[in-house]
Image (cartoon, rainbow, N blue to C red):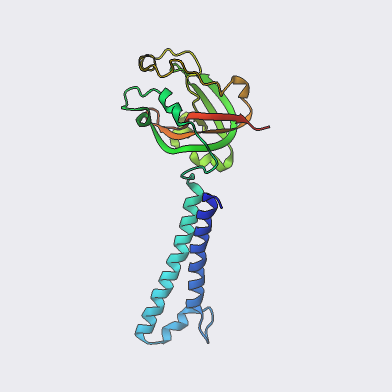
């Protein structure tokens, strides 16, 4: 069973246990489904039943909240993905202590799918590729993606173009290395892309950067 299915099943179990507990509390020999009828007992009995009702309701609410959270939160790790961590050696860090400080890692290896809508070369030698994600991946976007990237996720294949940016040249991260996983004929095509899911701390939006692979979907 995948991580996503496991966590979703757990949420449903929490929800189900809450519903079952509430149903058991509400059962009464003479007043099925009428929990208020329990109030006719002693003070201690009434207190006990009300505590049970509160616990059951909390179980239902907790299950619902857990399911909602897991539905909106990306998986901590894509179990089917495989990323080349050596690509980090070719990512410049600029004014940050390291590349991983400039690009804060949220998920070290994630696979997404969507349609490539635009791409442009950057001065650091990377491609700036915009992807219109498939619906199941759109929760990966943040407000900066919506406002500054037209609602697209950014992919950055590295060291793919001529480098003219001074800090990248000074660091020499592209010296003797070139990545060829992206060509402009992929614009307009639906692809599967795998890479590190990060937040670009210079600009605030979410990216796959560095990218390990971009594969068109037939």
Residue at left 48%, top 37%? 109
Tell me the quarter of the picture where residue 135 sits. Answer: top right
Query: 155 and 50: which one is in front?
Result: 155
Q: Residue at x 49, y 39 (%)?
A: 140
Q: Residue at x 49, y 26 (%)?
A: 156
Residue 177 at x, y percent in the picture: 47, 18
On the rendered structure, is 194 left or right of 59? right
Q: Quadrant of the C terminus?
A: top right
13 relative position to 184: left or right: left
Q: Quadrant of residue 104?
A: top left
Image height of 130 relative to 2, above or below: above
Of residue 115 and residue 33, the one placed in the foreground of this image is 115
Position above or below: 105 against 75: above
Image coordinates of residue 21 in percent, x first then y, are 48, 72
Residue 46 in view here: yes
| Spot occupied by residue 149 in the image (x, y as percentages of width and height) | 49, 29
Q: Is residue 62 above or below residue 113?
A: below
In the rendered picture of this protein, how many numbered marks are placed on residues? 0
Residue 141 can be seen in this image: no
Looking at this view, name the residue that lies furthest to the right. Answer: 218
Where does residue 172 sit, x and y in percent of width and height?
A: 39, 16
């Amino acid at each position: 069973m995948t991580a996503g299915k496991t966590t979703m099943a757990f949420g449903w179990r929490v929800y189900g246990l809450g519903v079952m507990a509430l149903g058991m509390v509400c059962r009464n020999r003479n007043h099925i489904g009428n929990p208020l009828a329990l109030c006719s007992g002693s003070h201690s009995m009434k207190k006990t039943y009300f505590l049970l009702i509160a616990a059951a309701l909390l179980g239902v609410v907790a299950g619902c909240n857990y399911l909602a959270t897991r539905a909106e939160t990306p998986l901590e790790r894509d179990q089917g993905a495989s990323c080349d961590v050596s690509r980090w050696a070719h990512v410049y860090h600029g004014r940050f202590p390291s590349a991983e400080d400039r690009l804060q890692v949220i998920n070290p290896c994630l696979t997404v799918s969507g349609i490539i809508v635009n791409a442009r070369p950057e001065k650091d030698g990377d491609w700036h590729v915009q992807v219109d994600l498939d619906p199941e991946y759109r929760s990966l976007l943040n407000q900066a993606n919506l406002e500054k990237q037209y609602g697209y996720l950014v992919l950055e294949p590295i060291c793919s173009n001529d480098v003219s940016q001074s800090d990248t040249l000074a660091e020499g991260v592209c010296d003797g290395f070139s990545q060829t996983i992206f060509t402009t004929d992929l614009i307009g095509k639906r692809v599967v892309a795998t890479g590190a899911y990060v937040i670009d701390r210079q600009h605030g939006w979410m990216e796959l950067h560095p990218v390990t692979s971009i594969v068109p979907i037939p």
